[in-house]
Image: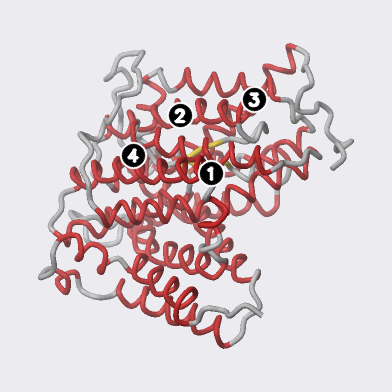
Amino acid sequence: MTLNNEIKYQLGDTVPQRENFLLALQHVIFFVASAVVMPVVVGYALGLSQTEVADTLQRTFFLCGVVSILQAALGHRYPIIDGPAGLWSGLLILMAGTVGSLGKSAEILRTDLETGMLIGGTVIVLLVILGLMNRLMKLFTPLINGVLILLMVLQISPSIVKGMTGITADHTTIDWKSCLVFFFTMFLILFLNMFVGGFIKSIATFIGVLAGWVLAYIMGITTRADLMADGVISLPKVFAWGRPTFDVGIVVTCIIAAFVLLSMTFASINGMSEVVGDEVDSKRMNKTIGIHGFATVLCGIFPTVAFMPYVSSTGIVKMTGVAARKPFYLASVLMMVMGMIAPFGAFFSTIPNAVGYAALIMIYALIMGQGFNEFRKVDFTNRENFIVGISMLIGMGVMFLPSEAFRGLPQVAGYILSNGLIDGMAIAFLLEHVILKKRAL
């Protein structure tokens, strides 16, 4: 693969000092734009207080810097930002929405999730070490990936609509102020994405969130935060959600999520390799996947939404013509510093629900498109129609069953069977690899 002549500074090039800082600052803006929304929405969905959400944001900023440096130095070696994954945030919100009906508290769910991410990441690392990753990845065919992604997005849609309308356990009617803020934010992000180019497009979500936040403040639906509640310097806390606990259903879900996310990881790496004209061999890809698994472990130890490399990073490199690692390293260090300065987390923790969910609906619209893209990789016959149709119908059908339907079951079985995502995935695996398995020619 030949180097891209449109790139002004290649991966190993030295950038002049002044440009180095400005380019690093640009990366930081994109870091923040990518990292700030999901931990806030997920944190409140999991029952965290504003102070705890602020702490979660700090850990997110810090880990963004750590993981991005590890990947750029030891893994894929590209200036690709690692940050909270939409797939993981969707799963965490889903679990938060269903756990109450099974008699489990939000506090226990959070500590279960710490364990789930720890084990999910560890499994990925071990499979890389044992050389089994390629074999197991073959089980996650485009059909199965597509079913999982679509079921996840469909299952999270009620939470998005509740965020849009301002409906909570204490407020059961539509809040029209929340609706107005939601649609203003959503349409602004949509406009910037579709009709504006360059750097503005790359931070469209950030601009939309700030503008929506201002409107929410004018309309009186924001909350205030004590920026100095944790002082100025606050280091990331280990197991901040509590001592890890074990739930087999959550662990299984986290392991599946870790596997499915790998296909998106490959897309990010391959996309950047094409932009910079630098081919990634299997050894480097294995290092990347190993560090990706380690990052998931870190997100369990320092609990936050688990990470993925952002494919949108390729847009930054294309736009600036700069693939050099040094500005990226500096930006990653600045993110780590932000993660230790408490007022940053406290400030962003006050993003209104309507604004956060408006940003999320844009993210999940793109994730839904990723699900359809998975199906485009397959030539559909009756076999494929049956696999997708049966899996989707059963998975979606379970979502509409009353929560009381599963109360007579043991807690573990109740959690697994009441989760349409897991049920649909199980049916898809059974049909794809056992009942309707393709015979070798």
Q: Amino acid at mark 1?
A: Gly
Q: Which structural element holds mark 3?
A: helix
**How many residues crowd around disc 2 within 10 Å: few (fewer than 14), some, or many (20 or more)?**
many
Query: Left or right of 369: which side holds 419?
Result: left
CA gap between label 3 and label 4 equals 34 Å
Q: Quadrant of the C terminus?
A: bottom right
CA gap between label 3 and label 2 equals 15 Å
Q: Which residue is mark 1?
A: 208
Point out the tag, 3 or 1, that comes first from the N-terminus.
1
Residue at the spot x=24%, y=75% of the render? 401
Query: Left or right of 30: which side holds 66?
Result: left
Image location (x, y in percent) of residue 235: 35, 18
Residues at marks 3 and 4 touching, judged by CB atoms closer than 8 Å: no
Q: Nearer the viewer, residue 294 or 421?
A: 294
CA gap between label 4 and label 1 equals 16 Å
Q: Amino acid at mark 4?
A: Thr
Q: Which residue is mark 2?
A: 63
Residues at marks 4 and 1 touching, judged by CB atoms closer than 8 Å: no
Query: Left or right of 158: which side holds 106?
Result: left
Point out the tag, 3 or 2, that comes first from the N-terminus.
2
Image location (x, y in percent) of residue 365: 53, 60
Q: Nearer the viewer, residue 330 or 187?
A: 330
Of badges 4 and 1, nearer the viewer stands 1
Residue at the spot x=54%, y=19% of the render? 334
Residue at the spot x=35%, y=27% of the render? 346
Task: Say the numbered circle drawn on residue 328.
Answer: 3
Of badges 4 and 2, nearer the viewer stands 2
